[in-house]
Amino acid sequence: MNRDRESHSVESGKTKAVNALIFVALTILAIFTVYPVVYIILGSFKTNSELVSGGLNIMPEKFNLDNYVQAWEIANFAQYTINSIVIAVGVMLVSVFVASMAGFVFARQEFRFKKLIYGLLVMFMFINVGSVSLRPLFELATKLGMNKSLLPVVLISAGLSQATYIFLINGFMRSVPKELDEAAEIDGCTFFGTYWRIILPVLRPAIATVALLSFRGGWNEYILPLVFTMTKEELRPLTVGVVALQNAGDGAAAWNILFAGSAIAIIPIVLIYLVMNKQFMSGTTAGAVKG
């Protein structure tokens, strides 16, 4: 009896120690994740001399709102914001439509080379061609006459992560009973009708996850818009415009204005995540359930 109590107490002690280590590790990870965002937001209220001098104090001596005024007036932030919204919303809509339909087809339909095509898609989740493909993509867009708008940026950005989104939707579809499809077919629904009327409402958590991830990807995209808008300042998104603020000072790097512009670019995506947090978490966990 005493041995059982001793073994139980030892196991309980080990569990508490493991939980404590996990808590410490997650706390450190959270600090490293949140600190840059907090530093940028607080730094956006500092003067340039405060930022250049450095120091351990992240709090500004005085909250200076003039940085935001200068950032908005020096750069065409109104137009940059509209361009960022166009890119992010466009990437989100294309990604949601293509990924949801492709995930539904892979989960429910049988066709030749299905496993091969899906295997190639999954493989591309781990392959990133990066900037190597920018030149041929730009030349292709130029030959097609698409380089005068944000359309190629939207289409290319949406295509970069489609494999991941399709994989997520397909995993979620495996937890959806096939009886729903069969009942819809009995009621006279076509394949597309089943997808539109039955599957899309069921896929809401997974779609919310894809929407949030794709919106974030489109909003934060930098290299691609930089290349496609290099000679068209009116098409630049916030990410490209913010970097241009670094040289907004008189012969010196205006870090205060750069931080203010960065804070303006960060705030929308943080607010969207706070609003869609529950749907995002339920979508990412539900996709792991196998049917």
Image (cartoon, helix red, strand yellow):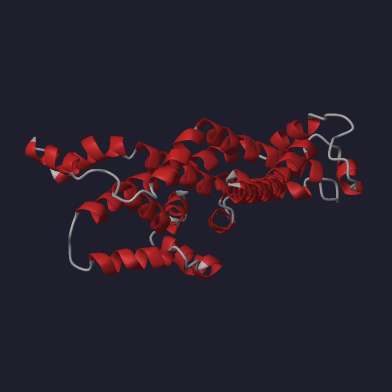
Taking depth in this image into account, of 23 and 7 the one nearest to the observer is 7
Determine the image quadrant of residue 71.
Answer: top right
Between 147 and 26, the residue placed more toward the observer is: 26
| Residue 3, x across and y down, in percent | 61, 51
Q: Nearer the viewer, residue 258 or 216?
A: 216
Q: Which residue is depicted at the point 29% across and 53% down? A: 102
Q: Is residue 125 left or right of residue 231?
A: left
Q: Position of residue 63 (x, y in %)?
A: 83, 29
Q: Is residue 9 left or right of residue 92?
A: right
Residue extending farthest to the front is 1
**Can residue 247 be seen?**
yes
Query: Is 240 placed above or below 46 here?
Result: below
Task: Give how far across and how far down residue 81 sits, in percent.
Answer: 58, 38
Q: Is residue 124 left or right of residue 70?
A: left
Q: Residue at x 84, y 40 (%)?
A: 58
| Picture coordinates of residue 226, whole percent (x, y) | 59, 55
Quarter of the view holding residue 46: top right
Q: Is residue 145 visible?
A: no
Specify the quadrant of the image occupied by residue 207: top left
Total labels: the figure holds 0
Q: Residue at x 38, y 63 (%)?
A: 122
